[in-house]
Image: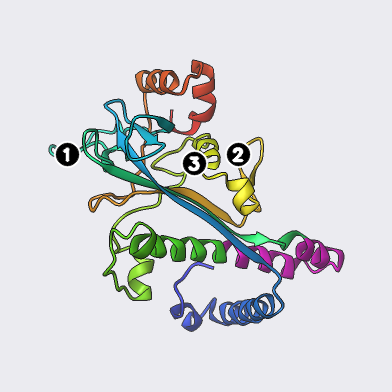
Amino acid sequence: MKGSYPKIFSDTERGVEAKKLFVDGQAMLDRLINEKWLKANAVVGIYPANATLHDDLHVFTDDTRTAIKCVFHSIRQQTRKPEGTPNLALSDFVAPLPYRDYIGAFAVTTGIGIDEWVKKFELDHDDYSAIMLKALADRLAEAFAEVMHLKVRKELWGYSPAENLATEELIKETYIGIRPAPGYPAQPDHTEKTTLFQLLEVEKNTGITLTESLAMLPTAAVSGLYFSHPESTYFGTGKISKDQVEDYAKRKGWTISEAERWLGPII
């Protein structure tokens, strides 16, 4: 239902149904918490990192920065911008050598154990409850990602220790830093998840796995990178042209056809 909480309850057309849905959702939320239907797992890591001239991010094994642990690849916008407005890439938010900078990575899930409950509801022909549980698990995953990002900013990375934001400010993302996810507008390439999963040993540490199409299971899961730059912001790469497809393929060690397959939506 389109609308914002709690204003939607006063909507003349959708208010009654919205209230019913809210009450049902709260009742199931209470049950899944009290009866421990789901388990939440998370893994995060903070690593020495530097940007390269070719829009890549080198993640190092330690702070000597002599050995590369893995490489993340970013894609630069090619859209025409007003004069003085840069065409962004995620690599812009990490300093190049010789500066000492860092990058974070994370994967969280709130869907461990969901399958048995969904199956139970479906066997009882209770599709409404099955859909409700999936929706709640997805929302809990996003909330868990928010909680872990807060913990990273204030404690684990600690680049914003004095942060003290109200819930509304957190929802508006007024804090310093971003957590973009592979497959989303700032990095449309889903294959970057494989690098992230290897770096964090995600399957071992959380139980989250990747399908052949690189979807996450359980589906109530979120993964991505942390950037701490005070000017870091979310953006979309928009459409890219052939020269950038060729450049990206070269950096990834792909054929052009592989690049076109994974980058199809933005070509």
| SS at mark 1 in the image | loop
Residue 186 in picture, x, y percent from top left: 38, 42
The residue singled out by tag 1 in the image is: 82
Q: How is the image coloured?
A: rainbow
CA–CA distance in space, label 1 to label 3: 27 Å
**Viewer-side label of 1, 3:** 3
Residue 72 in picture, x, y percent from top left: 42, 34
Residue reaching furthest to the front: 64
Question: Is residue 124 a member of the stretch shown in magenta?
Answer: yes
- Where's the C terminus, which quadrant? top left
Magenta segment: 116-138
- Main structural element of the magenta stretch: helix, strand or loop? helix
The residue singled out by tag 2 in the image is: 214
Q: Nearer the viewer, residue 157 or 243?
A: 157
Residue located 81% across and 61% down the image: 119
Mark found first going from the N terminus, 1 or 3: 1
**Viewer-side label of 1, 2:** 2
Type of amino acid under label 2: Leu
Q: Is residue 93 left or right of residue 239?
A: left
Type of amino acid under label 1: Pro
- Up the image or down, 54 lies above or below 204; here it is above
CA–CA distance in space, label 3 to label 2: 9 Å
- Up the image or down, 254 lies above or below 159; here it is above
Give the label on residue 183, or none.
3
Residue reaching furthest to the left: 84
Residue located 46% across and 48% down the image: 224
Type of amino acid under label 3: Gly
Is residue 36 among what the camera can see?
A: yes
Residue located 36% across and 22% down the image: 244
Using a 10 Å C-alpha cutoff, classify the residue at mark 2 as few (fewer than 14 neighbours), some (14 to 19) or many (20 or more). Answer: some
Mark found first going from the N terminus, 1 or 2: 1
Q: Is residue 38 left or right of residue 8?
A: right
